Amino acid sequence: MKTSRLGAWIAVIIGALYFLVPLAATVEFSLKKRRGEYSFDAYAVVLQDPRFLQSFSYSISVAIATIVVGVLIAVPTAYVIRLRLPQLRPFVEFVTLLPLVIPAIVIVFGYLRLYNSSSWLPFTSSARATDLLLVFGYATLALPYMYRSVDTGLRAIDVKTLTEAAESLGASWWTILFRVILPNVRVAVLSGAFLTFAIVIGEFTLASLLNRPAFGPYLQNIGANRAYEPSALAIIAFIVTWACMGLIQVIGRGARGSSAGTR
Amino acid sequence: MSFLDIQEVRKAYGAQLVVHEFNLPIAQGEFVSFLGPSGCGKTTMLRMVAGFETPSAGRIRIGDEDVTHLRPNQRNIGMVFQAYALFPNMTVAQNVAFGLKIAGKPKAEIDARVAEMLGIIKLPQLGARYPYQLSGGQQQRVALARALAPKPKVLLLDEPLSALDAKIRVSLRDEIRSLQRALGITTIFVTHDQEEALSISDRIVVMNEGRIEQVGTPFEVYNFPRTRFVASFVGTLNLLRGKVLDAASGRIEVDGQQIFAGRGIADLKTGEIRSAALRPEAVTLAATSSADRNVMHGTIDEVHFLGAVIRIRVRFKDNLISLDTFNNPNIPPPVRGSAATVSFAREDVMVLEGAEAA
Ligand SMILES: Nc1ncnc2c1ncn2[C@@H]1O[C@H](COP(=O)(O)OP(=O)(O)O)[C@@H](O)[C@H]1O
Ligand SMILES: [Mg+2]
């Protein structure tokens, strides 16, 4: 009993060190730009670089577009599967897991073959169309997270009876989906959205190979050419990501209180 | 002419026939209950009226309109579910307003109607609450108000009281009935609880294994059950099994004793085995012999003290008769194992349809 408790503690400490030491080292290194003393100089350089702001805001817009596309795909799909086609569930779950198994590089080469400028659908022929392709690509990458959180959210409500109640009151499918189902899986959609956000902000492969000015390639570019700034950037990206996660927690807790009696 | 008409409706899931040849005309403003054990097809039949299931054969008409193939959202029905099914993200008032909003009513009219409905269900103060802040009984009343607010042609309730505790079940039952009377709305009420069906309905449809066993007023169904199933399902009932000695006079031998049956004897055949129904309240624990009464001798098998009433079970050989007597503090109840004589009128012995194997 006592030794197993000790073993558990040792495991936790080793795990924590494994994550925290590189992080602490990165923080420390990012503060060392000025010789002989700690400073935020590297951060100042990064934040003053117009490309930082451009690439970061580009990635944020792409992330928001990806979230919209992801919600529009995942919510109706998960809803219909739950309500009408439960026999397709295992298949759909398998499909939603594929992006975790297939590397992004495979997806992007597939895209480049399918949608190059001499193809039927020349998505890569203009910057705007390539942005669209990037959004769809990200929606695919984020699909496992978005679909699963929406599906979990749907499990918490009585989808079938709520649908029938709304239908008997005259509601159409769109009304049911947007006025009844979506509001009741709001929290699940939000948590899917934040995960999507976190994925899109740091993504490199797709953005780089499609040659879009996203935050991931910018990070890589700085990393290859500078010493202290990449560390500062990594820390900024890390903080933004964790802020997203924290927000999921806060919103999740807030909403749990208000839906306690509906199970 | 009937207002709601179910004509020769059948429903099959694959090879399994869940509802057989269902025929039922329902008058405007009538309160009809579907009564039967779990799995007998009540919900399936109700859902076909609502439009959530499509009949495999037959037609359903509401008013002048054949609704057999209409979507539920075009049928103008109100539906109440066992699980309440209030929209968790909406307040009570928003729930009640939902159908009116869908119908595109102006805001002033919606507000007035919502206030009216909340008054009718006696929850005028709770419009701003969310469903999870209400008790089960309150939630079901809101569900009722939500279903009735758009003035549907038909109200359909699927075991709406089953999730509630006993006391609220009775009071809400009475409320549903008086509301239904006041609005004059044609109503189908599904339940497996015979007491509920008896107390609330204009007419009861007793169902078993997807078939209608009997349709009648509570009085008819309780007092004159047509089949053994109805007799045993509706009310507490004694079933006496015996051999027909004389078909013409209704003379039957039960455990070696001879009795006369007064009803259901038209199709008797001498020599066959039949069952007869006898209500506990028709039996007296005494030998009141007169020409039109049967007398049987047995032993006291069990005595249940229920308060105002004492239920006594008398055993013959294979057959049992339960009877109720009022509690009288001056007369102690009989002792188990002692001899007992019971009597009951010939008219109260009702032979059920169908001969049985010996
Ligand atoms: N969607 C369905 N698919 C297959 N069988 C069903 C379906 N719905 C109901 N049944 C079957 O139909 C029968 C009647 O069910 P139901 O109408 O729910 O009964 P009740 O409401 O009287 O309890 C049951 O045997 C049930 O298993
Ligand atoms: Mg049922």
Image: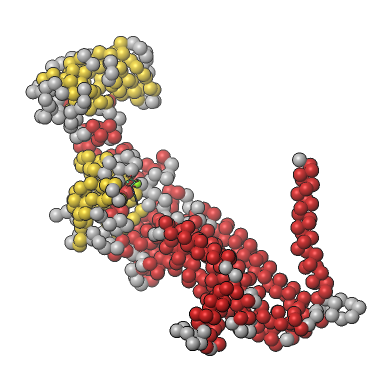
In the displayed structure, B153 sits above or below B208; it is below
Q: Where is residue A218 in the image (x, y as percent from the top left)?
A: 69, 82
Q: Residue furthest top?
A: B339
**Residue nearest the observer in this picture, A221 or B89:** A221
In the displayed structure, B68 sits above or below B229; it is below
Could you tell me if residue A143 is visible in this image?
Answer: yes
Q: In percent of the image, x 27 and y 50: which residue is there?
A: B12
In the displayed structure, B290 sits above or below A39; it is above
Question: Which quadrant of the structure image shows residue B2?
Answer: bottom left
Q: Where is residue A141 in the image (x, y as percent from the top left)?
A: 57, 70
Q: In this view, does B303 lie to the left or right of A126?
A: left
Question: Which quadrant of the structure image shows residue B39?
Answer: top left
Q: Residue furthest right?
A: A36
Colour approach in the figure: secondary structure
Could you tell me if residue A185 is visible in this image?
Answer: no
**Residue nearest the observer in this picture, A36 or B110:** A36
**Quarter of the N terminus of chain A within the rendering:** top right
Q: How many labels does the image show?
A: 0
Q: In this view, does A10 lie to the left or right of A66?
A: right
Q: Position of residue A250 (x, y in %)?
A: 63, 63
Q: In percent of the image, x 57 and y 58: which residue is there?
A: A256
Q: Residue furthest left?
A: B248
Q: In this view, does A148 lie to the left or right of B238?
A: right
Q: In percent of the image, x 70 and y 79: which residue is there?
A: A219
Q: Where is residue A67 in the image (x, y as percent from the top left)?
A: 55, 73
**Residue nearest the observer in this picture, B296 or B115:** B296
Q: In percent of the image, x 24 and y 43: which residue is there?
A: B211
